[in-house]
Image (cartoon, rainbow, N blue to C red):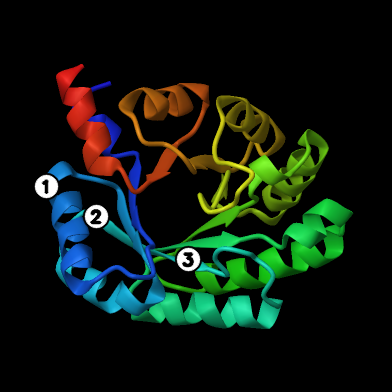
Amino acid sequence: MDEKQLAGYIDHTLLDPAATTEQIEQACKGALEFGFHTVIVNGRWLGRAAELLHGSKVQVGSVVSLPLGGDSTKIKVAQAKEAIFAGADEVDMVADLAAIIEGDSRYLQNQLQAVLKVCRSMRPLVVLKVIIESAALSNEQKVFACRVANGCGVDFVKTSTGLHPAGGATVEDIRLMKEAAPNCRVKAAGGIRTARQAIEMLEAGAERIGTSAGVQIIEQFRTG
């Protein structure tokens, strides 16, 4: 893997609620310079990010129901629509953790399908990534969530918000999620700050890396 390939897997993330215009602009500039796949920002900054990245290969992404995932289906659908109309090419939505923990497949499935319907109604299609907060779940619960997501046809299952005290991505979770959701791609996120960590996640089967340390990761990769 070369530097360009590694950068192409990275979702460069800036979700700090205290982020400033200057920081958002710097994140977009860095994404253009290094060739990251996507810049992910809070909804408040989507218009600016879309403007800065217009005409480039870098995608624009935003989040729905971050960090808790407990919003109603109606609210999640509205958030997804607003993000897309503001310029998002990709949506990272936190799944309802209570539904996962209680094994409520009907609630979880209905919610995922409702948000996916919004994403699929757009032209071009909008990518939907579903965050299951894997560090807070048992293996059985992770498999349950991934199977529901797989059955709904979402694009990605994603490990973590990066904000839960239970932790972030692990190589073991990537392998488990890849096996449990064979029709979905897997995004590793949460605590990934080094080139070695990123490469380990990709080797385990991840097809996207979510991190706020994208520049640092590429600079580390350059120096070996």
What kind of residue is marked 1? Answer: Glu
The residues tagged by marks 2 and 3 sit, at their Cα atoms, a distance apart of 17 Å
From the viewer's side, name the closer residue of 190 and 93: 190
Chain-order first, disc 1 or disc 2: 1
Judging from the image, what secondary structure is the residue with disc 3 in?
strand
The residues tagged by marks 1 and 2 sit, at their Cα atoms, a distance apart of 10 Å
Q: In x, y percent, where is residue 74?
A: 67, 82
Judging from the image, what secondary structure is the residue with disc 2 in?
loop
Which residue is under mark 1? 33
Q: Is residue 209 left or right of residue 103?
A: left
Label of residue 63 in the image: 3
Q: In x, y percent, where is residue 35?
A: 19, 44
Label of residue 58 in the image: 2
From the viewer's side, name the closer residue of 127 and 202: 202
What is the residue that sits farthest to the top in this orientation? 224
Q: Is residue 23 above or below residue 46?
A: above
Q: Is residue 215 left or right of residue 206?
A: left
Q: Is residue 27 left or right of residue 136?
A: left
* Labels 1 and 2 touching (C-beta < 8 A): no
Chain-order first, disc 1 or disc 3: 1
The residues tagged by marks 1 and 3 sit, at their Cα atoms, a distance apart of 23 Å
Residue drawn 39% across the image and 81% down it: 85
Quick one: quadrant of the N terminus? top left
Chain-order first, disc 2 or disc 3: 2
